Amino acid sequence: METRDKLFTEEQYRKQLAGYSKRCKQLESSIMEIINAEKEHIQLYSAPNSNVAYNKTVTLFGCKLNSFLTKYSVGEDMAKLKDDYNNLVKTLTNHWTITGMYVQMLWMLSIGIMLDTDEQNIRILSSMIDNENVNDALYDFLIKYRLTDWERCSDTVLFPVPYQSTLSIISSNNQSKELSIQKLEKYLKKEWYRGHSDCAWHDDHKYGIRHDGYWSFESGALVKVLGLDDTSLKGLPYYPYDMVHWNENKI
């Protein structure tokens, strides 16, 4: 199997996946214990059971998302990852807030578009965004690609660094697809990674302990939505080429 993100070896990724699997099972068991205790009106913690279960489910989603990223980075089959994605949506449902989770939702929307996920999954994600009353132009653009009845229409992004550039990529498509791809290439080469320097995962490959992979999933989603020729982006760091093209030439 050929790894997609070359910053870790397959052996390192496999060891990491085993750790994620163990952690997810522990969290799922703990959540189930809380649910059963709640049914019996047994309080397990100083905080309400429901609060603890909520927090553990948020942690579980993060663990599953990290596992998904690692599986993509190590080179696993995209069809299998589509099942994992469905599970991610199910886990995230009613457990998302904009506080500290902007990037995760952007990834979920972008991955869903690239994987041609069911409309229902996009509706679940968009409902959480609507419930949080989030106005973000990049979210809106991606959602409208799948849901024509989405009414939000912001003209700004919540985090201009690095996402302001995506709006220029989108608007340039009206002039020239070549211009859009040029701007996207610049975004990937000079802006995307640097623009996430405040994220916990930034530079984590340097320590050799954990590295899920660096992926600009919104770049792949933009290529698909805008109908761009991404030949020049193949092999470029951070660009999820295999995810964009996973279902081509399949019956």
Image (cartoon, grey):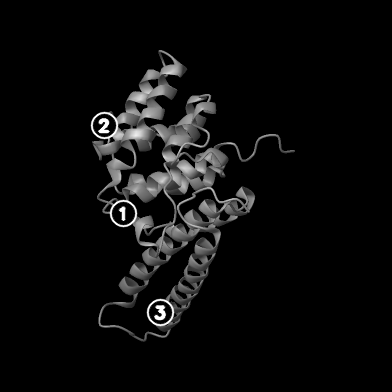
Q: Earlier in the sequence, mark 3 or mark 1?
A: 3
Local crowd size for mark 2, using a 10 Å CA cut-off: few (<14), some (14–19), many (≥20): some
The answer to whether residue 68 is above or below residue 32 is above
Q: Which residue is mark 3?
A: 34
Local crowd size for mark 1, using a 10 Å CA cut-off: few (<14), some (14–19), many (≥20): some
As drawn, the label of residue 20 is none
Position in image of residue 198 (x %, y %): 25, 50
Q: CA distance from mark 3 to mark 1?
A: 22 Å
Position in image of residue 1 (x %, y %): 63, 54
| Callout 2: SS | loop
The quadrant in which the C terminus is found is top right
Is residue 48 in view? Answer: yes
* Amino acid type at mark 2: Thr
Q: Given this view, does label 3 or label 2 mark the residue nearer the observer?
A: 2
**Identity of the residue furthest to the right in this view:** 251
Name the foreground residue: 39 vs 128.
128
Is residue 148 in view? Answer: no
Name the foreground residue: 76 vs 112.
76
Q: Which residue is mark 1?
A: 97
* Amino acid type at mark 1: Thr
Q: CA distance from mark 1 to mark 2?
A: 19 Å
* Amino acid type at mark 3: Ile
As drawn, the label of residue 156 is 2
Residue plotted at (70% across, 34% down): 249
| Callout 3: SS | helix
Position in image of residue 89 (x %, y %): 48, 54
- As drawn, is 199 to the left or to the right of 60? left
